[in-house]
Amino acid sequence: MITQSQKIASILSNDLYKANLKCIEEAEADRIFCKHDMEHFNDVIKIAVHMAKKNHSHINEEWIYAAGLLHDIGRGKEYADGTPHDEASVEIARVILKESGFKAYERLIILNAIRHHRNKGPKPKLLIREKSLRSVLNKADKLSRKCYECKAADLCYWPMEKRNREDYFENR
Ligand SMILES: [Fe+2]
């Protein structure tokens, strides 16, 4: 983690957050493909923060952290009952964000980014700052994957042209 505000520390110590992380960890214990763990969340945050700064997007960094930590938190529910994880993540994140002290308008923006981080289906029209957060989360999520050192590359469904050939920070 790069920095921690009180609200971000609150997410990390939230019981619902920890319980869902544990569900994901157990379900992915033997997973050969990309995992959805704290390493992934931190990678997404680092890249998203860098992209936002590079683009002069002025996105609230706390929102990037919250979205990065929570965007895949519904993975455990997806493994358990088939609920798409973007939907499940929103439902879980809604509770955690409120308990962590995020204001209603902040929750709306962060939940929108989580709901549409997979870039699937129709997207709602958003204000600039909501769109920016959604955009960096979506891009950072994909750019964070270490396809160049993946042992399951032969079995991965990602098309070759979409795979990452080097670490995001390699030439930056
Ligand atoms: Fe992700």
Image (cartoon, helix red, strand yellow):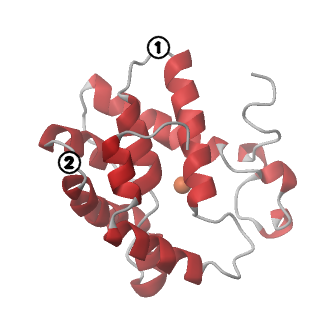
Give the label, 2 or 1, closer to the camera.
Answer: 2
Residue at 35 percent across and 28 percent down: it is 60
Residue 118 appears in the figure: no
Between 74 and 155, the residue placed more toward the observer is 74
Q: Is residue 146 left or right of residue 56?
A: right
Examine the image and state in which quarter residue 170 appears. Answer: top right
Above or below for 79 versus 72? below
Which quarter is ligand 1 in? bottom right
Identify the element where label 2 is drawn: loop
Residue, disc 1: 56
In the image, farthest residue toward the bottom: 80
Residue 5 in the image: x percent, y percent?
37, 39
* Residue type beneath disc 1: His
Residue 23 in the image: x percent, y percent?
48, 80
User: Is the CB atom of the residue marked by disc 2 within 8 angstroms of ligand 1's nearest atom?
Assistant: no
User: Is the CB atom of the residue marked by disc 1 within 8 angstroms of ligand 1's nearest atom?
Assistant: no
* Residue type beneath disc 2: Gly
Residue at 74 percent across and 31 percent down: it is 169
- Mark 1 or mark 2, which is nearer the start of the sequence? 1
Residue, disc 2: 101
Q: Residues within 10 Å of mark 2 (few under 14, many from 20)?
A: some
In the rendered picture of this protein, how many numbered marks are placed on residues? 2
